[in-house]
Image: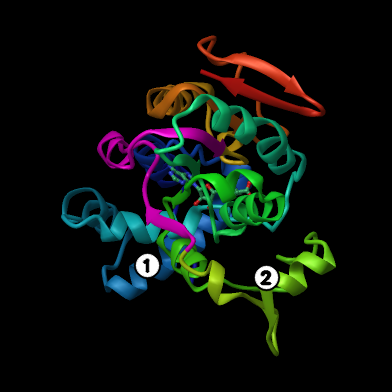
Amino acid sequence: MSSLLSKENFLKIGEYVYRKSGIFLEEDKHYEKLSKYVNKRVLELEVDNFRKYFYKLRFEDKDGSEFQELMNGVTVNETYFFREKDQFETLVNKVLPELHKNLPVSRPIRILSSPCSTGEEPYSIILHIIEEGTVVEQRDIEVVGIDIDSTVIKKAQVAKYTDRAVHAIPKDILAKWFRKKALGYELCDDLQGSVDFQVVNIFDKEQMRKLGKFDVIFSRNMLIYFDDASRKEVVMTFYDMLNPDGYVLLGHAEYMSRIVSVFTAKKVDNTLIYQK
Ligand SMILES: C[S@@+](CC[C@H](N)C(=O)[O-])C[C@H]1O[C@@H](n2cnc3c(N)ncnc32)[C@H](O)[C@@H]1O
């Protein structure tokens, strides 16, 4: 089947995706993937051209399921356990001890992994917290993981991983917290359910508000897909969602200072962290 997505239609749907999700689709990087997706969807929906599909997407998608399908088709979900692990070490060696000292023990410390993809990042947070041990023995810590893509959230909840996903976990930790399966690994029962996973679009202010306030927000390897205006919007949402003195941790290739000046940047070992 030849492509139903002309370059002009690519721009139209790209503009729509950008407005709703902040994801900036570039012709040289995304045209092929989106074009295949639109062809597949047009067949499945039994509409015969792009115009009808785009109409359905914009005006007949009352429950948001068509938009959800589209997002599941265009997101880049690359992740693995212990990715950019300096930041998990900074969390347990610097950030958590400081928060623990300053916050009443009666209330939990809350950490958001935004976006979490298939769960490797929030589970890496949990593994570091448990392995470090001291703070979690003295108070509750809650970890929430969110992503716009409902297929990755389902996978995160099942917690079954490929050899590649776990390759960076030290052998002793892998043996302690995972079961080897015929194919790949499964997170042990004790840690299943340790993260509250939810499908949330970071640009949906109402959904974000409902998650409540956090002390630490990990937002790694998502802002790179946004332009500066969207980055600014997301980062200001994080600012509003953080408790006073809370921290944001970004991916290694991502920077805050150029976008907004409301956070104080601190260098801890090799990691830049941003405090409210
Ligand atoms: C490359 S993964 C990063 C996962 C993890 N943070 C890491 O660094 O390994 C980027 C994720 O961002 C999610 N994403 C993109 N736009 C989003 C949005 N508007 N709201 C929530 N999640 C979004 C994608 O679905 C994808 O799973």
> Where is residue 88 drawn, in percent x and y?
69, 43
> Where is residue 56 drawn, in percent x and y?
22, 57
In the figure, 95 relative to 172: above or below?
A: above
Residue tagged 2: 177
Give whichever of 61, 136 is nearer the camera. 136
Q: Residue at x 45, y 62 (%)?
A: 153
Task: Tell me the kind of residue under disc 1.
Answer: Arg
Q: Residue at x 57, y 20 (%)?
A: 275
Give whichever of 146, 136 is nearer the camera. 136
Find numbered disc 2 in the image and state the secondary structure of the residue it sits on. Answer: helix
Task: Tell me the kind of residue under disc 2.
Answer: Trp
* Label whose residue precedes the other's in the sequence (1 or 2): 1
Which class describes the residues within 10 Å of circle 1: few (<14), some (14-19), or many (20+)?
some
Q: Is mark 1 within 8 Å of ligand 1?
A: no
Q: Is residue 87 visible?
A: yes
Check if residue 203 falls in the magenta segment: yes
Residue tagged 1: 41
In the figure, 248 relative to 181: above or below?
A: above
For the residues labelled 1 and 2, the Cα–Cα distance comes to: 40 Å
Q: What residue span does the magenta drawing correspond to?
A: 194-218
> Where is residue 27 drawn, in percent x and y?
57, 42
In the figure, 243 relative to 187: above or below?
A: above
